[in-house]
Each structure stands twice: as C-alpha cells, then as structure tokens.
Amino acid sequence: MEPGTARIAVDLLGGDGAPAVVVDGALRAFNADPHLHLLLIGPPEAAGGFLDVLPPAARHRVTVRPAWAAGSVHDQPVRASLAETTVRAAAAAIADGTADALVSAGDTGATVTAAALVLGRWPGVRRPALVATMPAIKGPVVLLDVGGSVEASATTLSRHAALGAAYAAVAHAVPRPRVGLLSIGTETGKGDRARRAADPALADQPLPCDARYVGLVEGYDIALGERCDVVVTDGFTGNVLLKAIEGAYAMAGGPPANGGAPRAAALLGVAGTVVVCHGAARADDVASGIALAAHLHRRRAATAISTLLAVEPGRNHHTNNTEVTA
C-alpha cells in the first residue's frame, strides 16, 4: 500500500449500474485503503447505504456532496458538463481543493468535457487522451487513446506518444519506454494517411524519459509486450480494440493470471487527476478505478507528466474551445 492520504471524488450517478454498483465499489476501495478519503457526489439517499455500514471511527473519512443530475448519453456532452451534474461537481471539487482526484463511470464525453472546462487543459494538448494499461506476457503495455477523442491526425498521434511515454515512466516506473504506433503492418508506409505521416515524424521526435520510438506495431504486440511498452493509436481504434480484448477475456472465462483487463483509464492532458471507468463497470471495476486515482495522486502523476512535457504543472489553462469529446 502506497503511503499518503488520497481524497477521491466519486460520481455516484455514473455508469449503467449506478448508484448501487458505484456505492459497492467505493466501499470496497475504502475498506482496502486506510488512507483513502472519499467525497461521494450524488443524492444523499444513495450514499446512505455506504455510511450505514461504516464504523463510527471511520466516518470522518467520508463526505457527501449533494447533486442530483447525471450526464446522460442522450444529452449533448458539452451541455451535460455545463449543467450541475455529478461529474461537473466532482471536477469542481478538484478545482476548489476539496478533492485530489475524481472517478466516474458516466458518459465519457461528458466527463472529458467537464474535466477540460473546469480544470483546464495543459498548454499544447488540444485533445486530452484516455490511457489504459494492458496486461501483457512481458509486462504491462500502456495503450492510448482509448476513447478521449476520435480524431486521427499525425499531430494528435505524436502528442499521444509523448503523453504515453511520460505516463509509462511515472505511473509504472518503466525505464526508457519503448513507443510503437499501431498499424496494419510493421513495414514503412503501412496504414492510413495519419499513420503514414506520423511514423516518420515520430522517428525524429524527441520523447520524454529517454523513450525511444520503435516504429509501427500490430495488435498482437499489445498482448506480447516484447517490442514496446507504449502503443499509440486514435481514440476510435483504441476504444474498439479495448472492448474487443475485454470480450476475449470474457469468452476465455476471465483475464490471464498475470493481470486483469484494464478496468479504468486515466485522462491525460487536463490539470488534475481524472479516472474514467467503463459505463458497464461492476463494483470491482469501480474499486479498481478509485485505487488507480489514489495511486496517480500519490505519485503526483499529473504534475510529473506535465513537467516532463515541458508545460507549466498545475496551471489551469482555460479555453472556450469545447471540441474535446469523443
């Protein structure tokens, strides 16, 4: 268990099984980490079951902030994030210093937009990226983007390479991360226009943490983990790939023994620690997301990564451009 208090804002209304599944997951995370403090954001009655089972000595570690609206997949994400929703309240808790990080299993578009508008983006990051850590035979492989944005441009892919390299070094202590660009073959010139442009650009691009670009990689390289520690792709392809892998685990009866399927993804590029769980998250998935948020906060990952990318750590770089959703 890593030392240090971590105050995590939890969106009680995010996810298909909310609030019951979220409350159950939050309770599991709370019981597993004696240094965890939770800010439960949602209807007070939803948090009541959580509080009822806590021993009196532990209740000081839990606070409830009332909020009654959830960002719906049927709403425009920007409109949902601007309303008084639970995910916006969670982002505001980071901004006002009440929380160190937020976790939501709600609509990804609303979560990404709320984080970008309330917390601000790092200078130079036009589109924040969601990064998931995949289990592999030779060790964990960082995959991004897995749903923060569907844009597939050479510029975006190059920025994701830098984000992924820094994340692998900070979050997983990977020395000199090896970075690969996902494509349909490893030969030069393979892939669509964005990959064909990004491949030579990445070969010449300095990466943080002494990371090195190893060239084009294929899907099986994610499962093997032999050629690279970071796999870069666009959010559309990455999200499809992630869900296909989750489905394969389910068909096989569960994840491999050396690690589970990623249960949560970190949002990189905003001035705060934000973790997004799958909309169909179960209680253990939510608990895993809260544990990831605590881990990233304790490592001061957001500040460390922004510093490695030569941006101003912790600065709220606000923008009126709301085009950041998937």
Image (spheres, rainbow, N blue to C red):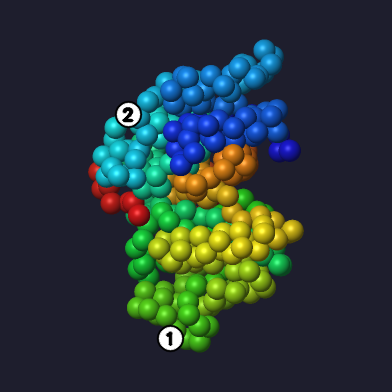
Frontmost residue, 294 versus 218:
218
Position above or below: 323 against 94: below
Position above or below: 325 against 293: below
Residue drawn at 55 percent across, 30 percent down: 23
Residue drawn at 43 percent across, 56 percent down: 147
The residue beneath circle 1 is 189
For this view, does 1 lie left or right of residue 200?
Answer: right
Residue drawn at 42 percent across, 45 percent down: 270
Frontmost residue, 278 versus 166:
278
Question: Looking at the image, do the residues carrying marks 2 and 1 touch, with CB atoms under 8 Å apart?
Answer: no
Classify mark 2: helix, strand or loop. Answer: loop
Q: Indicate the quadrant containing the N terminus: top left, top right, bottom left or bottom right.
A: top right
Frontmost residue, 74 versus 200:
74
For this view, does 294 lie left or right of residue 188?
Answer: right
Looking at the rendered structure, the kind of residue marked 1 is Gly
Tell us which disc is closer to us: 2 or 1: 2
The residue beneath circle 2 is 84
